[in-house]
Image: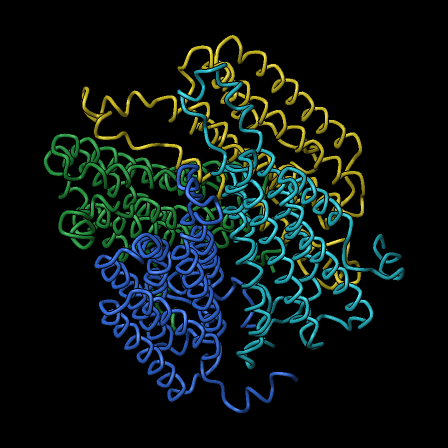
Chain colours: A cyan, B blue, C green, D yellow
Amino acid sequence: MESQRDREDTEPQPAVMSSGRLEALSDGVFAIAITLLVLDLAVPSREESRDGGLAAALARQWPAYFAYLVSFLIIGIIWVNHHTVFDKVRRVDRPVLFANLGVLLAISVIPFPTRLLAEYLTAGRDAHVAAAVYSATMLVMGLAFGALWVAITRDAALLHEHLDPAVSRTALRRFGLGNIFYLATIGLSFVSAIATLAVHAALAIYYCFDQLPTGPQARARRRR
Amino acid sequence: MESQRDREDTEPQPAVMSSGRLEALSDGVFAIAITLLVLDLAVPSREESRDGGLAAALARQWPAYFAYLVSFLIIGIIWVNHHTVFDKVRRVDRPVLFANLGVLLAISVIPFPTRLLAEYLTAGRDAHVAAAVYSATMLVMGLAFGALWVAITRDAALLHEHLDPAVSRTALRRFGLGNIFYLATIGLSFVSAIATLAVHAALAIYYCFDQLPTGPQARARRRR
Amino acid sequence: MESQRDREDTEPQPAVMSSGRLEALSDGVFAIAITLLVLDLAVPSREESRDGGLAAALARQWPAYFAYLVSFLIIGIIWVNHHTVFDKVRRVDRPVLFANLGVLLAISVIPFPTRLLAEYLTAGRDAHVAAAVYSATMLVMGLAFGALWVAITRDAALLHEHLDPAVSRTALRRFGLGNIFYLATIGLSFVSAIATLAVHAALAIYYCFDQLPTGPQARARRRR
Amino acid sequence: MESQRDREDTEPQPAVMSSGRLEALSDGVFAIAITLLVLDLAVPSREESRDGGLAAALARQWPAYFAYLVSFLIIGIIWVNHHTVFDKVRRVDRPVLFANLGVLLAISVIPFPTRLLAEYLTAGRDAHVAAAVYSATMLVMGLAFGALWVAITRDAALLHEHLDPAVSRTALRRFGLGNIFYLATIGLSFVSAIATLAVHAALAIYYCFDQLPTGPQARARRRR
């Protein structure tokens, strides 16, 4: 009973809510941010297509496609991990709501550095600045996600079942490691903007496989 | 049983509906409005970056980031409060639906005064007009939220459980107080646009902590 | 049991589905269309604000605000009525899915004639064309909504409970009457674009009160 | 019990989740992509309306309306089929989540080739390139949908009930056939861009009627 998305047990405690609407708002923000990215892909004007035709004009836009793909992948992965985290959550209180707003702020802002990098990826010195802004956004996102994890795990009453403190700490250490990588990409930005974007793609693919640790028991039960 | 999002008890009464779809539409509008704000962050053109590079061009855009952050925070807080209010609601009738549309109108329009303020925050005399439009939008939002609260609490049959009239009046008085503050920010706009935006940020942070009053009983049950 | 959003009874019949995801997609389209309208409100450029300041430049944009408000109201009302109709629906089949896509097409296109009317409302002869396009969009929307109603009521198995054929016919006649009004506004467009928009506002407000007919029995049960 | 969207059976298996949030994100992306298409319909500028008035200027935009309608229809159909597929799904694991992200990538990118085709449909030689990009997007979408089907049907534990391998293979063959058609439209693009768009409309209408195969048994139970 307790794990249904029912409301009985949330009413008497206005400050502790079921996570249904938080997930609905979050899914909305993820869906919009991931879809708004397409507005950054500009149709070449007739003038831009004059030299070498439309095909060449489209080909010259490769930084926009590259940035689009990496940002799509990143938002997608974060959504999967957000999903994985909230599958453990039974109730949310105000600290969790605000920590989650922090994550949503970072997610919803991603189309801006993506556009910036698409515009400046091959612009010489300014490419470094654009890549650093992109990397800094990812660092903020990583820190916000870590803060969300702390907000959720600080109170066992918010979770569906007991979470082993060791597991929680391992997850936190992994988040921390990710943030060190993001910090490193800010430095890398001043070496090569293109390499920075490639590293972000690689980090996202790494997170595809990396997930919250699951014990052998959980793994055994999976296919039950 | 009665507090489930079931449909049995709503069918025979076409004019009184469960609040599920109202929350879905509202979450959609909140999610889109909060994410559309990012479209107001313009990538500096190559020309704008000529003097001092991209970093300087981005730094010159600080009013846009400031307005973005404040509006994000405001929409986020209103969402949390909307969530808190509808956790008490069992059914909605047409007056509630239309009062809620009023709130959504105010929410969905926020990206416009945000863009206006971002563009004119440092524009001398016009900054005052932009800040006044921003403040007036918040006042309309505050009034619409108050009207929604009246529409919800006017009929006990719409709520999950009895709401103490004193509690309801206290909440209404707090909404009223907020509106007086919003009214005051319209006046402040003609003194300083930047101070006005800072006050809106402070008001939003104040609303983070301020919530619907909860009795000591409810507080005691929270961590049960 | 039968009225829950469960899946047991939908699985064995792939062509007859529960209405949950149809409502989710529809709420998404409604929420986005109603929020995208704000993108039509353009911030006056610094040049446009030169004569008489920003306040005068904003005041000159009144057609955009008027069109915005009317379209917001119209989409809001249609959403309320869509909500009211689907509260009666238990399952959807492919004809209903496609009739609903027709309604969503009309809804999602509304920001375009709104922008058109905002731009041309005071543009002399072209205002008539813009108003006619706006009115024609509403007519298409009205026809699509009527088709959706026919698709839903053609098969009693799709509904939660028996719907009196007389009630269904009365509702259809009202939809038909609305469409005759919409047709008339196309004619009115060539007399006065501003009057046409005002009539659309009045029609929307009329639909606020007009709803699916409810028998005295249903009315009696409402406040039970 | 097992077919409810409950959480009990998903918690102990972090890597195998209920499909609720996947559907929520997907519905969000579908709803946004289908509604963003309207941003591609540009209001003719006052200058463009000088020759022959607004009516003529709007008429000259017919490629944009044509592309809009076809893309709307395509996204709508894919949504219906996505809905049909996930009605069979009980749980999703990470391969399904990532295959679904592939489908969402293809869906969310559709507004870009639509805008491209709207701009270049009557632009002579470049029209062929635009049509080929449009067709290639549909091919990618078809391949992603096929991969999603393989990811879902590879593990019977993810489905609500046993799916006849013959049925699964038939569905896969149909997806494959669709992809051969999409591949053929890339070739057709270099003959006629307008014919290519018309064929995409025809393919979409064909998919309206084509659905996952249902046995006579299922059909008999439909109206139970």
Viewer-proximal residue among A11 and C35: C35
From the viewer's perspective, tell me whether residue A204 is left or right of residue B182: right
For the view shown, which residue lies furthest in the front direction? Answer: B52
Residue D85 percent across, percent down from the top left:
66, 39
For the view shown, which residue lies furthest in the top direction? Answer: D191
Asked whether residue A1 is in view, the answer is no
For the view shown, which residue lies furthest in the bottom direction? Answer: B216
Viewer-proximal residue among B155 and A44: A44
Residue C211, above or below A94: above
Residue D84, above or below D132: below
Where does the C terminus of chain C fall, quadrant-wise?
Answer: bottom left
Viewer-proximal residue among D42 and B120: B120
Quadrant housing residue B205:
bottom left
Residue D107 percent across, percent down from the top left:
56, 36
Give the residue at x 52% y 48%.
A33
From the viewer's perspective, tell me whether residue B223 is left or right of residue D91: left
Give the residue at x 56% y 80%.
A13
Quadrant housing residue B146:
bottom left
Give the residue at x 39% y 74%.
B203
Where does the N terminus of chain C fall, quadrant-wise?
Answer: bottom right
Residue C40 percent across, percent down from the top left:
31, 44
Viewer-proximal residue among B51 and B223: B51
Quadrant housing residue C183:
top left
From the viewer's perspective, tell me whether residue B36 is left or right of residue D61: right
Asked whether residue D198 is in view, the answer is yes
How many marks do you count on the picture? Answer: 0
Residue D82 percent across, percent down from the top left:
61, 39
